[in-house]
Image (spheres, helix red, strand yellow):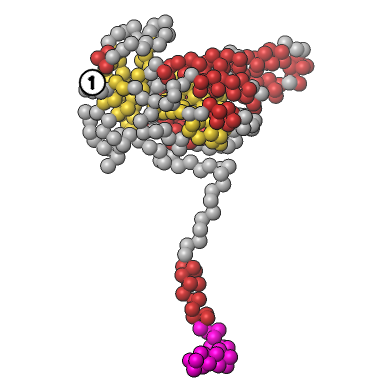
Amino acid sequence: MRLGSIFVRFLLSRPAVLLLLLFSALSPHVSAQSQLPTPTPPPNQDEQEIDPDDVISVNTTEVFLPVTVRDNAGFLVSNLTRKDFRIFEDGVEQPLSDLSLRQVPVDVALIVDASSSVAGNLDDFRKAAEGFASHLAVEDRVSLIQFDDRVVLLQDWTGSLVQLRRALKRIVPGMFTRFHDAMLLASRDQAPRRDARHAIIVLTDGIDSGRGTTFDIALRAALQSQTTIYVVSNTQIERARKQEELSTLLTGPDSAVRFNQLRIDDLRLGLAALSDSELNLEQLTAATGGRLYIPTAFNDLERTYAEVANELRHQYTLYYSPVNTKRDGQFRRLRVETTSRMHKVSARVGYYAPRK
């Protein structure tokens, strides 16, 4: 009781001391906060900063290699055994065991270019994508990504056709084409399960707006993540449209040709860009063990996507332990052969060894 009355009198008679005590009690907290580093503002998602070195490599003693085999007529060959394959790494044949040939599921990222060149035919893509997913096995999964001036994940990995159908309805047209960023991010960030193949199927003309990363970095990311890339290219559709318009402009009178010269030059540049893009797309798909499809009309998309689904169902998956066990981060070039010269083999050109 006495201590309580003394404490009350102290508070009433010493307001200045009270303030000093309160400040002393709070000052360690204030001081500690003042020493914390100022938080860095999150990056603008529209910019999507890309770190070229932020990619994954093979980090195991066993190399995983999806392989597609076709005959001279282009038909898939699906009756081969482990003894029919030979793998060479940097020119050295690799040993294959009885467990080298396995059946594994596939995780497929469906990617659509929602820029102006495709925007008018998104319904054709939706129908083709839904049909593709319906052809996959029960243990397979898909995800959905659209890109234009941004790269947007519309649906994460799922085995549900209902979820994919809902996500397809969320695709909206955009501008520009960040194709290289889409390939990099899908290879690097949209990672599959550890026991699954990783494939990308992208509908695009492949002409990048030049606002992000480069083609070489995108290709490196695909190789480092062991991703097989299939491209359904609308370059021929665009080429036919541009050539028709160009022919119309050039057949007019000289005065009309001069008046439309800027548009004529623009169309010629566009045609050249389409040809250059097809070369890049061919390189991207061949290097990763995929394939380039060039339909002549958007209503061919459903059939084209069904062909890709059929290839994935008949793809071989080879595993081997490399003779070269160095963990030096270097690129190891691969070559896969079969015992028949009548076969055409598609597999990625190599992989990056892990670092120490």
Compared to residue 14, the image places residue 299 above or below, namely: above
Main secondary structure type of the part rendered in magenta: helix
Circle 1 SS class: loop
Extent of the magenta region:
1-21
Judge whether residue 20 is colored magenta.
Answer: yes
Q: Quadrant of residue 285?
A: top left
Q: Tell me, yes or no, if residue 180 can be seen here.
A: no
Which residue is found at the position 23% from the left and 30% from the top?
324
Locate the C terminus by quadrant.
top left
Coordinates of residue 193 in the picture (x, y in percent): 39, 33
Q: Residues within 10 Å of mark 1 (few under 14, many from 20)?
A: few
Coordinates of residue 179 in the picture (x, y in percent): 53, 31
Which residue is found at the position 48% from the left and 72% from the top?
29
Which residue is found at the position 27% from the left and 22% from the top?
100
The residue pinned by badge 1 equals: 98
Judge whether residue 295 is colored magenta.
Answer: no
Q: Is residue 131 left or right of residue 287?
A: right
